[in-house]
Amino acid sequence: MTMTELPLSPAQERLWFLDRFDPGQPNNIAFARRLRGPVDPDLLARAFAVVTSRHEALRATFLDRAGVPVQVIAEPGAFDLERLDLTGEPESLREERAREIGRQLFDTRFDLASGPLIRAALLTLAADDRVLVVVVHHVIFDGSSQSILLDELGTAYGALLDGAPPELPVLPVGWADYVREQADQPAGKVEQDLAYWRERLADVPTLTLPTDLPRPLFKTPRTARVRHNLDGDLTSSLQRLARVQRCTLFMVMLAGYQVLLGRHAGQDDVSVGTASAGRSRAELEPLVGYFVHTLVLRGDLSGDPTVRELLRRTRSTALEAYAHQEVLFERLVSELDVTRDVSRTPLFETMFVLHTQGQSKVSVLPGVSGGPFTVGVVQTLFDLVVDAWITPTGLAMTARYDTGLFTEETVAAMLRRFEVLLRACTEDVDRRVSELPMDDAVGLRSVLARGQGVRRPYSGTVLSLFGARVAAAPGALAVGSQTYRALDERANRIARYLRRSGVAPGAVVGVRLHRTPDVVATLLAVWRCGAAYLPLDPGLPPARMSWLLTDSRAGFVVTQQNAGTPVDEVDAGRLLWLDRDAAEIETESAEPLGHSSDSGALAYLLYTSGSTGWPKGVGVPHSALTNLLLSMRDALGSGSSDVWLGLTSLSFDISGLELFLPLVVGARLVLVDEERVRDGAAVVRLVGVEGVSHVQATPSGWRMLLDAGFDVRSVVALTGGEELPVGLGRELRSRVSRLVNVYGPTETTIWSTFAEVPVGVGVVSLGAPIGNTQVYVVDRGLRPVPVGVPGELVIG
């Protein structure tokens, strides 16, 4: 038997190497047709033989000659059409059984060396009801080839049915001729094209689309499909926009798609792949084979262009790309020396394809009615591929997406936003890209609703809520071994001492004390004077301490003799000593003062480092603190049986949750003293001895505790103040009963969002806003962005 040996085209080489690298992975094209009417299986097999005899690519196999692949074109021969009778199955199950067989045919790997690389099966559902399934390996077949094969199959079958020899027009060029031409491209033209692409794709950034699931280490084709249609009016408007702006419909759609991706990724440099039919000459159009080229189209959204300007840029990019399309993508990746990442495709991660090839003129056989039959095969090696094509009713779109990265809901929402963007483009070409809406009214309402915390009528202050707990259970333990009654009386005595010393409503009082129950009593006492406290860590350098006191205009400092260095800037009359004046304080009445702070008064003043590095004072009113505490109470289900660990420095705002939430719910606070606060093992022992139920720490603080052996399955853990790494979240969650990730800047009162961290967490979220709080992600114009689109976080 005579056989022809040929080299592989560069595109074919890529698919051949992929087959060697991952032999179990099918890289096939599958399509099926429902055939209703009389079908002669023998004539259909002969019609297939006519088509395969006519097209050399359909008779190709691929051999390894000492590591170098060659394709071998076999002589024409008979075609083996598989025939399966499903009439023995229950009628209600036959269609699904046909789909199952179609998927099996798709999943069955072709042997590139032995072939054949096309298979077909005729499935009989009833006497005049059949399904034809065709599967071809991609190395010899592309999308345009499907229409060619079906057209010629119908023509050949019709002729054989009439008893006449099939007469198909002579092919002007054979597959072998095309492959040899590819191997003999002029070196000068190739180098010129390569120079263009080297410059065009230099330093192309990775598209960082937000995903629903963490990106796996290896790229795998787990794919599903979402459909979305654009109506005829919008399609006509897009075509009209293309004509007016001297573009093609593809260019308009591409520009909109790149805006969609750029807005989702927060990037203005967006590379998208597309498929070029690769049939650059008319004589290649009737030929079956693998011609398709992949082009990388780099979108420039910089400078916030208008729609008109963006279309101009897109037209220029596309025209240049098509002018240099002879350099195949596979060679381009090699020439650019792209760093390979097995979890991503090189140069781009998403494609947009507007299919313009004609549909098969004979989609079913002569004398047989029917149409396409879906077997449910979906495959792509990219993160996301959007295919679009013109239908009689408008533009149809299908998104194929990696189910290991995205959910169906996310991709469907992206397609809806694509439509909103395209519609806005047709309405005003002088609108800036950043001004184009992406959500319709329903989507916007959904975003606004998601950003709203639960509305609850919280009222009172820590003082009033604490007072109610004193009245309800005066003998219950409040701080350490101190009861609620004892804490209340100690706070009243200190408050009277402060008042007699000159602390008046509206004052700011510095508090520089050791971590003992007197810290809590003093803070309550400051509030009972109608004043606000300023935490001063005993370890602060004198210069920093002095600056804080001057800037805050703190009139008094409550301190202890061994609590840090002296404060020279505060004259002796304004230093209030809890230890030196202990006897005097004990003589004060334990009855409450007549004044206490109202909800609108300042509760505390706390300094952050400030975004510029210069300290910034933040004043927090009692109402905001009450909202935080009662929201966290409800979210955690916190009650009087809890035991909270007081681990955080008073100078860190999150200490307010540890100190005051126990007091407003009637729980107990266990303070960690200075000697043990940095000793992880000592803290772990204290948690066990005291029966602590709630522990709050930053992720770095939790790292210290975990390294010290923390493993208390009865503890509710809270973490915030820093990003929680996924690995740390998994480890911590496995050692506690419940893990909560909280977030919020000092300015919005400790925590603003609350997220339950599940076992085996994959993505750590900030969660939802706490009660009476609004949290939105907004764009540069302060407009809420759709879910999943990056922007700036704003809190209200």
Image: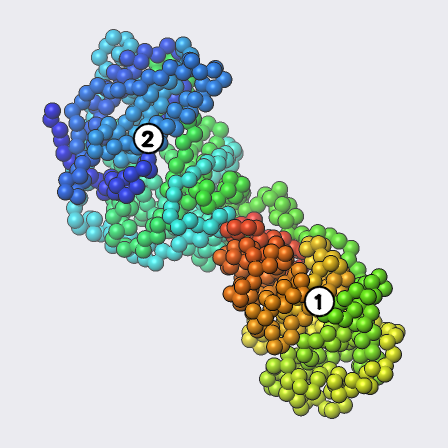
Q: Position of residue 618 (x, y in %)?
A: 67, 72
- State left or right for residue 538 relative to residue 295: right
Q: Earlier in the sequence, mark 2 or mark 1?
A: 2
The residue depicted at 52 percent of the width and 57 percent of the height is 731
Q: What residue did someone put label 2 on?
A: 108
Q: Quadrant of residue 69?
A: top left
What type is the residue that disc 1 sits on?
Leu
| Outermost top residue | 163
The alpha-carbon separation of the residues under discs 2 and 1 comes to 65 Å
Most extreme residue toward the left, as rendered? 2
Residue in the foreground of this view, choosing between 693 and 441: 693
Instruction: Identify which residue is drawn at 45% across, 55% down.
Output: 267
Q: Quadrant of the N terminus?
A: top left
How many neighbours does mark 2 have within 10 angstroms: few (below 14), some (14-19), or many (20 or more)? few
The residue type indicated by label 2 comes to Thr
Left or right for 473, reference 751 = right
> What residue do we see at 75% from left, 83% from top?
578
- From this view, report whether residue 54 is shown above or below residue 675: above
**Taking 127 as reference, is 283 above or below it?**
below
Q: Is residue 306 visible?
A: no
Residue under pointer 1 = 669
State the image quarter where residue 643 is shown. Answer: bottom right
- Pinpoint residue 295: horizontal percent, then vertical percent: 32, 45
> On screen, 734 above or below 614?
above
Q: Position of residue 550 (x, y in %)?
A: 67, 84
Badge number at residue 451 = none
Across and down, in percent, residue 606 comes to 66, 73
- State which mark lies toward you, 2 or 1: 1
Name the residue nearer the viewer: 471 or 566. 471
